[in-house]
Amino acid sequence: SQELEQSPQSLIVQEGKNLTINCTSSKTLYGLYWYKQKYGEGLIFLMMLQKGGEEKSHEKITAKLDEKKQQSSLHITASQPSHAGIYLCGAPRTDSWGKLQFGAGTQVVVTP
Amino acid sequence: EAQVTQNPRYLITVTGKKLTVTCSQNMNHEYMSWYRQDPGLGLRQIYYSMNVEVTDKGDVPEGYKVSRKEKRNFPLILESPSPNQTSLYFCASSFRASRDSSYEQYFGPGTRLTVT
């Protein structure tokens, strides 16, 4: 079955530094979502990618989907305390697009 | 305001006492879904609905029921809750789910359920 592998599991970054989170699938993706979650709270939609090679940016966050549509990265430039939280990637299953899978999440801690 | 609402937000109950968690969206979305989130296991899909009267199992449907009689509502029913259903539950909705296009999923605020 298709699974989404997210890495790293967690990371600590100093305020002002950049960080990158990766999300990898063993199968071609129909679409890829990135969400942010504060601990124990709801998920906030960040970006959605559909086309191979697509790149989207919002404020200091950039997400890319590779040409083969099997890997996505989320890059945060000049991290701030507001960027702390859990980042999750999600995608429709290739065998049933009503079913969605999510990566295990990456916990981001931003230190002063 | 476009939103997905869930009720209750917090619930403590006892084993075997039937309960329903409601989910409602005001965006006229066709697709709705329920997830549970557990430490170390991530977010897992319980059930989903492609449209009214169309529901299907996700990855962890055991012990749960759903219904979709109206477009806006998608309640999650636990007929006989057990302690292993203690979890954080999320409802989500999307314009549509299709192979050709992906649409943003809007998530509710979550329901924290404890079964003793």
Image (cartoon, coloured by chain):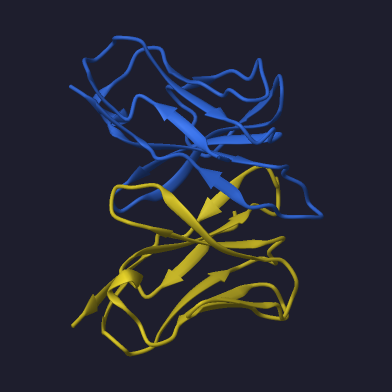
Chain colours: A yellow, B blue
Residue farthest to the front? Answer: B1
Whole-percent x, y for residue B6 in the image: 43, 29
Residue A30, quarter of the rendered image: bottom right
Q: Nearer the viewer, residue B84 or B92?
A: B92
Question: A58 and B101: which one is in front?
Answer: A58
* Position above or below: B101 against A50: above
Tell me if B48 is positioned left or right of A102 in this view: right
Which part of the image, by quadrant, shows the C terminus of chain A? bottom left
Q: Tell how many labels.
A: 0
Image position of B24 with respect to B107: above or below:
above
Residue under the image location 21 percent in, 15 percent down: B14
Q: State the image coordinates of residue A96 (x, y, percent, origin top left).
A: 70, 45
| Quadrant (top left/top right/bottom left/bottom right) for the N terminus of chain A | bottom right
Residue at x 32% of width, y 56% of height: A38
* Image point (28%, 11%), residue name: B16
Q: Where B6 sits versus A31, above or below? A: above
Kindly indicate the quadrant of the structure image that contains residue A82: bottom left
Q: Position of residue A13 (x, y in %)?
A: 27, 83
Question: Which residue reaches farthest bottom?
Answer: A17
- What is the x, y in percent for residue A25? 58, 67
In the rendered structure, the answer to whether residue A22 lies left or right of residue B8 reads right
Quarter residue A85 falls in: bottom left
Q: Residue furthest right?
A: B100
Q: Nearer the viewer, residue B10 or A58?
A: A58
